[in-house]
Amino acid sequence: MALTRSQIEKKLSNGYLDELLELWQTEQGAAKRRDLDLMAAALPFPVDARLRVLDLCCGPGDVGRSIRARYPHSQIDCVDRDVFLISICIGVNRREGISAQDFVRDLWDADWHNGLRHDYDVVATANALHWFDAHRVADLFKDVFGMLRSRAVFLFAEPACTEKMFAGGFAEWKSRQPARYSRGNWERFWTRANEILGYDHTKLLGSQHSHLDEGMPVSGWVQALRNAGFECIDVLLRDADGVILATAKP
Ligand SMILES: C[S@@+](CC[C@H](N)C(=O)[O-])C[C@H]1O[C@@H](n2cnc3c(N)ncnc32)[C@H](O)[C@@H]1O
């Protein structure tokens, strides 16, 4: 039988947290560390700033903690719909003395942001927006815009496809690059998670169907940001799998 959030949090001893984090890091691919370092490095604030940060679709919380590593006085709030993944995030953040508020919310719900701040300095996310369709992404960008103070930053790392004109050559080049993800690494993470929990949590993850997957070109992400009101949009990085974009609220 599925466990409640407090039962999961009790179960996740330090040993389990470390083991799961290591499996998660492997599952997320070797380039993830670079992506997170870049996202934290790009933030245009002094390192002693007390930033209010939201780790959107936090999962186990890599994104927020990499920002906290550069901005140790910051508060890192977290939101995710999955109680198990957010429990890892909460457990690790608590252990590391990170002040945070956490919210179990489904971002398909229009009111997902009720009760969260509307003066964040930073909203950041990785590998999560592609679970939504383009229409929902457009709305989520408007929600994020409304949750930021003026001059605050929104940044994300997501899959992106290539414009049709360049798709053939890009795909040929990509086929010669090391694959970022492997089914085996995903299964290793979830097999261990299920052993620890004592039931098959993957059945509760919701649809395993990624709506956008790699279907959004960089120009699509940029346009959706512009439509939401963002300005000063920059591509921090583009590689075989995706793109890292940073933008600011005017
Ligand atoms: C691939 S994981 C990435 C997690 C984290 N951002 C990271 O980089 O490690 C995708 C995350 O998005 C969350 N997610 C997917 N759909 C969601 C939804 N509708 N509402 C809230 N969270 C969602 C999942 O629960 C999962 O934690």
Image: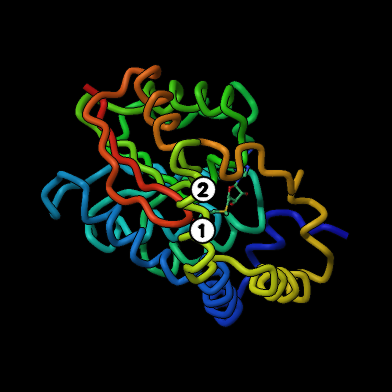
Q: Is residue 117 left or right of residue 29?
A: left
Q: Is residue 220 left or right of residue 207?
A: left
Nearest to the observer: residue 169 or residue 208: 169
Indicate the quadrant where residue 64 lies: bottom left
Residue 94: x and y in percent read 45, 63
Mark 2, residues whose alpha carbon is within 10 Å: few (<14), some, or many (≥20)?
Answer: few
Name the residue carrying label 1. 172
Asked if 180 appears above or below 139 in the picture, the reply is below
Q: How is the structure coloured here?
A: rainbow
Q: What residue appears at the point 84 percent right and 66 percent down from the top-left corner?
A: 199
Residue 63: x and y in percent read 40, 55
Indicate the quadrant where residue 8 lies: bottom right
Residues at badges 1 and 2 in contact (C-beta under 8 Å)? yes
Name the residue carrying label 2. 168
| Residue 8 visible at all | yes
| Residue 77 visible at all | no
Asked if 183 appears above or below 159 in the picture, the reply is below
Q: What residue appears at the point 76 percent right and 44 percent down from the top-left corner?
A: 207
| Quadrant of the frame with the C terminus | top left
Asked if 13 appears above or below 210 in the picture, the reply is below
